[in-house]
Image (cartoon, grey):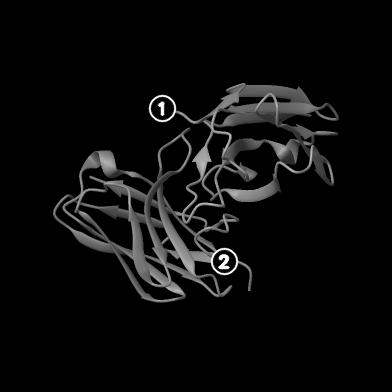
Amino acid sequence: DTEVTQTPKHLVMGMTNKKSLKCEQHMGHRAMYWYKQKAKKPPELMFVYSYEKLSINESVPSRFSPECPNSSLLNLHLHALQPEDSALYLCASSQDINLNEQFFGPGTRLTVL
Amino acid sequence: QQQVKQSPQSLIVQKGGISIINCAYENTAFDYFPWYQQFPGKGPALLIAIRPDVSEKKEGRFTISFNKSAKQFSLHIMDSQPGDSATYFCAASMTTDSWGKLQFGAGTQVVVTP
């Protein structure tokens, strides 16, 4: 299995809702990443997990809360989002944190109303 | 401050032509240079990557040329096909550090006309 899967594909939520994005990989990779991508822009790094521990938080607002339940799964919990948080949220993984061949999932298209 | 500068912003090429995208960087500590291809509504897919110990790498119709002294690298798409129409991102990172963040270029939208 050489892919990163993400669910859901699309998500529409109100500013008072709580929702979660899920990411899964079965490549035995020990580093996992969350990125945010706005239209016509490159991906922006949000969080990095290495060996299930949060290694990097790129000063992301606390309304985004990552979680790594095990080495194959990565969640992003969303609460009290703003309309400007609407974007494509991408998960990626790599064999290790300093082996930068990152493989991206298809993304979750999030719309905040 | 953008660490990797990518040009052009967009490119239109006829089927069978050559698409060329250029990237430039300043940080000489970068030692890994990947290119990603992204179709609308999809995640970026790693296309090809190069390290600075080689000047060229070819995979099928895709070639990376690397000029270490000029701190530039480029992607050439030979015999461009309509299916190559996508956005292409170059990137750079340091893998010798404990953590090498991927620094992306701004992206190039390539349209291949039939």
Look at 63% across and 28% down and name the residue there: B23
Secondary structure found at label 1: loop
Q: Nearer the viewer, residue B13 or A11?
A: B13
Look at 46% across and 34% down and name the residue there: A41
Determine the image quadrant of residue A68: bottom left
Q: Position of residue B37 (x, y in %)?
A: 63, 43
Label 1: chain?
Answer: B
Look at 70% across and 45% down and name the residue there: B51
Q: Which quadrant of the rendered structure holds the C terminus of chain B?
A: top right
Q: Which residue is mark 2?
A: A95
Q: CA distance from mark 2 to mark 1?
A: 28 Å
Q: In the shown orientation, is residue B80 left or right of residue B97?
A: right
Q: Nearer the viewer, residue B26 or A79?
A: B26
Q: Which residue is mark 1?
A: B1
From the viewer's perspective, is residue A103 above or below residue A53? Answer: above
Q: Position of residue B3 (x, y in %)?
A: 49, 31
Q: In the shown orientation, is residue A28 left or right of residue B20?
A: left
Label 2: chain?
Answer: A
Q: Position of residue A43 (x, y in %)?
A: 46, 43
Q: In the shown orientation, is residue A93 left or right of residue A37?
A: right
Q: In the shown orientation, is residue A3 left or right of residue B111?
A: left
Q: Which quadrant of the rendered structure holds the N terminus of chain B?
A: top left
Q: Which amino acid does the dot numbered 1 rest on? A: Gln
From the viewer's perspective, is residue B42 above or below residue A98? Answer: above
Q: Residue furthest left?
A: A16
Secondary structure found at label 2: loop
